[in-house]
Image (cartoon, helix red, strand yellow):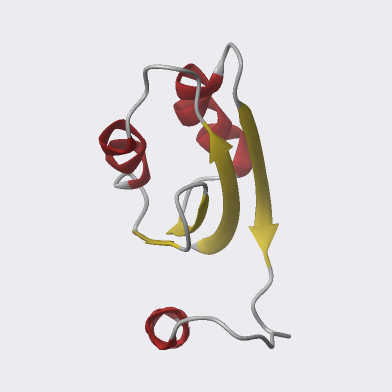
Amino acid sequence: MASYYSIYISTKKGIDADKVEDKMDLALDWFRLNTSYWVVYTSSDANKWQERLQPLVEPGGNLFICRLDTTDRQGWISKEFWKWLKEKR
């Protein structure tokens, strides 16, 4: 069963955005909210995402991965994100 995950990634030096996007493409779908924050819709768990992304982060970067419960939500963000989120439910 697929779930949403919140992923914050600050890569190590020398890693460009295309390399991060290549990894995010392993999800069923994803939405990039800014250069460091992604929401992925995936059948993989947090451990699998850490395994995928850790080489882009160590040493010197940061990575936070957390399952995201979208049932209780509010906020001001792009209409494109709200549309994307609604399509996945």
Question: What residue is rendered at 64% in x and 44% in y?
Answer: 65
Rendered location of residue 7, percent (x, y): 57, 48
As rendered, which of 81 and 5 lies closer to the eye?
81
Count of picture labels: 0
Rendered location of residue 85, percent (x, y): 46, 80
Rendered location of residue 53, percent (x, y): 48, 29
As rendered, which of 50 and 12 lies closer to the eye?
12
Instruction: In the displayed orientation, state which residue is furthest to the top.
Output: 59
As rendered, which of 48 and 39 lies closer to the eye?
39
Can you say whether 69 is above or below 44 in the image? below
Can you say whether 64 is above or below 16 in the image? below
Image check: 12 left or right of 20? right
Rendered location of residue 81, percent (x, y): 44, 78
Asked if one can make out residue 1 in the rendered structure from this viewpoint, the answer is no
Question: What residue is rendered at 33% in x and 38% in y?
Answer: 17
As rendered, which of 75 and 71 lies closer to the eye?
75
Image check: 77 left or right of 42? right
Can you say whether 69 is above or below 64 in the image? below
Question: What residue is rendered at 61% in x and 34% in y?
Answer: 47
